[in-house]
Image (cartoon, helix red, strand yellow):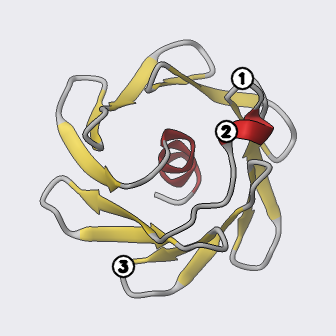
Amino acid sequence: MALGCLLIMPLYSQTLRDQTGALLGRIDEQGTVRDASGKILGSIDGHGNVRDEAGRFKGRIDDGLNVRDASGRIIGTIRNRTVRDQFGRMLGRIEPNGNVRDRSGRLIGKAEDVREEYAAAFFFFFW
């Protein structure tokens, strides 16, 4: 499935929390990423491009669900809700219920109504 079909702008605000339930950030309907205090961290557009708060390109999630840095180098992948680094080592998993677990299975966060691509982008680029 092409990323153009996967990464469309959310129709509602999406929330990311840490393992204690404390708010980490939100991604709003326009793709703006904010931290818990509301400060703008950057944005994720409908084509998978990630920008910092000044609008500088940080990287992207491409059509193959590869996470690329600003130079285009693959720094991770998303497959079957599992996030891996560029060497294929599992970094974590986004469960269907939104729990985000690290490689040892420890709960590190919660993605509420967040597409896995956006959750992965948040954790790769903003957290």
Work out whether 58 lies above or below 42. Answer: above
Residue 86: x %, y % from top left: 63, 21
Which label's residue is closer to the chain start, 2 or 1?
1
Residue 71 x, y percent position in the rendering = 87, 41
Q: Nearer the viewer, residue 124 or 47?
A: 47
Look at mark 1 in the image and give the residue it sits on. Answer: 1
- Number of on-image labels: 3
Q: Are marks 2 and 1 in contact (CB under 8 Å)?
A: yes
Query: Helix, strand, or loop for circle 1?
Result: loop
The structure residue drawn at horizontal position 68% and vertical position 46%, both measured from the top left corner, is 7
Residue drawn at the location 18% of the way across and 40% of the way down:
107
Amino acid type indicated by mark 1: Met
Quickly name the residue at label 2. Answer: 6
SS of the residue at dot 2? helix
Q: CA–CA distance between discs 3 and 1?
A: 33 Å
Instruction: Return the residue found at the far left.
Output: 20
